[in-house]
Amino acid sequence: MKKLCLLSLLSATICLGLFGFMAFLVGNDKTAIFVPKPIPLVEVNQTPPDTKVNEIVRSMPKLPEPMENPPSTQPPDVETNDEGIGFEKITMELKNIGTKINALAGSSDADARPVVRINPKYPPTAARDGKEGWVKLLFNINEIGGVFNIRVINAQPKRIFNKAAKQALKKWKYRAKLADGKPIIQENLSVQLDFKMES
């Protein structure tokens, strides 16, 4: 019983001592709070050193000396007609150059003149098999030279080159035929498109 009383008294003393020490720590007014001082900003401005300016003195160019006897501005071999207008004779020699232009490009109609001709694309199957042939087409031309109403008359071999020939002829442009100064529709014109492996 005595030990229990001693222990309780000792524990109470220790608790009171701890509470007193904690109160001392909390209530100490002498503790200084460190407040950092603001760092002053220092601006450094450097003045550039004085430099010497190089002045370039340019002299005015000398004018050319006037010529004593200037050349004549009159062109040579100039004749004057009755009205006093000067002209120069020009002689030109023309030679017969043996050139021939096929304006119809395979068409049998003299009135139709193709302006734009698109070559047909060779069908891949025919090119693979090495087949050649031709397609004869019948078509009409409108007032602005466009091709329409395309029909196959004959083909050799049958149905292999028909589609390629039609697609190509549809892109052709013709010079429209004029009647009394106005363009007119031309009907039932024919053309033959040849399909050869060389071309």
Image: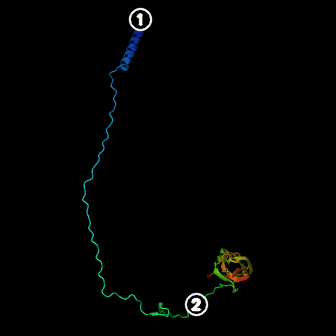
Q: Where in the figure is residue 116, as x and y percent of width and height?
A: 63, 79
Q: Residue furthest top?
A: 1
Q: CA distance from mark 1 to mark 2?
A: 147 Å
Q: Residue furthest front?
A: 83
Please state which of the two labelled residues, at mark 1 or mark 2, is closer to the viewer.
2
Numbered label attached to residue 2: 1
Q: At x 37% / y 89%, what residue is drawn?
A: 72
Query: Is the residue 105 above or below the residue 29 in the image?
Result: below
Q: Out of 123 and 46, give the one closest to the viewer.
A: 46
Q: At x 58% / y 90%, what residue is drawn?
A: 99
Q: Out of 73 and 105, give the one closest to the viewer.
A: 73
Amino acid found under the numbered disc labelled 2: Thr
Q: Where in the figure is residue 97, as x and y percent of width and height?
A: 55, 92
Numbered label attached to residue 85: none
Query: Is the residue 77 above or below the residue 146 in the image?
Result: below
Splitting the image into 4 quarters, where does residue 61 fall? bottom left
First in sequence: mark 1 or mark 2?
1
Split into 4 quadrants, where in the image is the N terminus? top left
Numbered label attached to residue 99: 2
Q: Where in the figure is residue 155, as x and y percent of width and height?
A: 73, 81
Amino acid found under the numbered disc labelled 1: Lys
Q: Secondary structure at mark 2?
A: loop
Residue 152 in view here: yes
Residue 159 in view here: no
Splitting the image into 4 quarters, where does residue 157 fall? bottom right
| Mark 2 surroundings: few (<14), some (14-19) or many (≥20) residues within 10 A | few
